[in-house]
Amino acid sequence: MSVQRTAAAASLALGSASRDVRVSGLDPILPSRFQLGAIASAALAELGCAAAELADQAGASTGAVETSAVEGARLLVSFGLQRLDGVALPRTNQSNPFVRSYQCSDDRWIYIHGGFEHLAQGLADLLGIEINSVNRFKAQMGLK
């Protein structure tokens, strides 16, 4: 599927009809059955279009908006590569059991993201536990 079709499926307009938008590359880039690079690059292109529109309004000269599926994939994993003075930055949710990957009984994986309070509450509600019952949650998920 092209990035343009992926963008359309995700309801991203890729800027105004008059803007030159170029997205290159094809998935798979990351090991997934989903076209993560294409989806992320479509979002990057939409962000680029919005930034170009703001620059146009400020009177700046803008050119084409360009990105690629590779840049989209990089965006998705960049948080894990951040360094400060050569030292990896700690992840704010590293010990949060509501933010991590879990292996399913069919050997596939799911990533849950409960790093924001409303997302964690939704997960707790779905699992029928209190949000502060982290030890119970860890036990239910087979964690130590």
Image (cartoon, grey):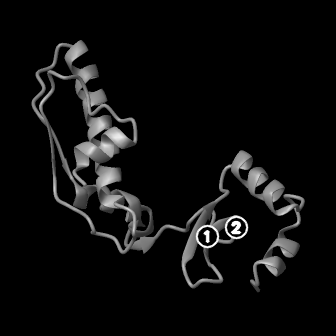
Residue 92 on image: x %, y %: 61, 61
Is residue 65 left or right of 33 when viewed as pictured?
A: left
Q: Residue at x 27, y 34 (%)?
A: 14
The image quadrant where one finds the C terminus is bottom right
Please state if 77 lies on the left or on the right of 49 as rendered.
right
Q: Please identify the quarter of the rendering in which residue 113 is found.
A: bottom right
Q: Is residue 19 left or right of residue 57?
A: left
- Report the Cα–Cα distance between label 2 and label 1: 8 Å
Secondary structure under tag 2 reads: loop
Measured along the vertical axis of the image, is residue 61 above or below residue 69? above
| Residue on which disc 2 sits | 96
10 Å neighbourhood of mark 1: few (<14), some, or many (≥20)?
Answer: some
Question: Looking at the picture, does residue 85 appear above or below residue 21?
Answer: below
Q: Which x, y percent locates residue 70?
A: 23, 61
Which mark lies nearer to you, 2 or 1?
A: 1
The residue under label 1 is: 100
Instruction: Tell me whether circle 2 and circle 1 mark residues in contact (CB < 8 Å).
Output: yes
